[in-house]
Amino acid sequence: MSGASKLLGSRQHGSLLERDLHTLLEADPSFESFALEAHSLIYFAPAEHGHFQRRTYTPDVVARTTSGDIVVLEGKAAAFRARTDWAEKEHLIRDAYWYDHGVRFCMLTEFDIRKEPRLSNCKIIVSRARGAADPDLALRLGDAIRVRPHTLGELYRIVAAPKASVFATVMALVYRGTVQFDLAQLVGETSTFSEAVAR
């Protein structure tokens, strides 16, 4: 069961890979909400004698971005993606979403979803942001970061508050999309936090 607060409807994920995909979506402030297996797409595949066969496909995730765009996401192990039966229909599904509905279809494997340290950073953001409960501390940290970027170590020194509270509050600011840091580097005292660019 997924604990993501952005998740609408059913909370039961189908695999550990899907669970990790949900973590990325939950931690990414550019996504407003997402739903699991929210609909079935009807598309047509070539059949014998020049005919077409009606088929259905149910995606893992349908997500809405903060700009209002809809994105359909499929998390699939690379070994399954390479299978002939999937390879034959993936492009048909992608085309049906785009040409029939104007929606992007993104296929993600474990190599995309479980890229480190991004996934570990996202897990930290999601888990620690929930522990932030001091709006005054959030205001002080946000103001300091707006003036100029600071490392986490600098924030510990310049803001009078326990380290655990500072860390949780900074993660909450990242979660809300007002502050950012380089997800390609594991978060630590040398991580630099800056004001988030407009999305």
Image (tube, rainbow, N blue to C red):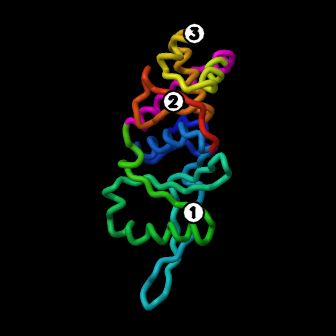
Residue 133 visible to an observer of this rendering = no
Name the residue type under label 2.
Ile
Which residue position is annotated with label 3? 161
Tell me the distance, in whole angstroms, between the alpha carbons under discs 1 and 3: 50 Å
Between 61 and 10, the residue placed more toward the observer is: 61
On-image quarter of the C terminus: top right
Percent across and percent down for residue 105 are: 52, 60
Between 77 and 146, the residue placed more toward the observer is: 146
Percent across and percent down for residue 170 are: 56, 23
Residue 125: numbered disc: 2
Image: magenta residue range: 117-139
**Proximity of marks 1 and 3: CB atoms separated by less than 8 Å:** no
Residue depicted at 39% across the width and 72% down the height? 88
Name the residue type under label 3.
Ala
Mark 2 surroundings within 10 Å by alpha-carbon count, few (fewer than 14), some (14 through 19), many (20 or more): many
User: Quick check: is 180 in the magenta stretch?
Assistant: no
Residue 40: numbered disc: 1
Percent across and percent down for residue 64 are: 63, 50
Residue 5 visible to an observer of this rendering = yes
Instruction: Choose the circle earlier in sequence order: 2 or 1.
Output: 1
Residue 54: numbered disc: none
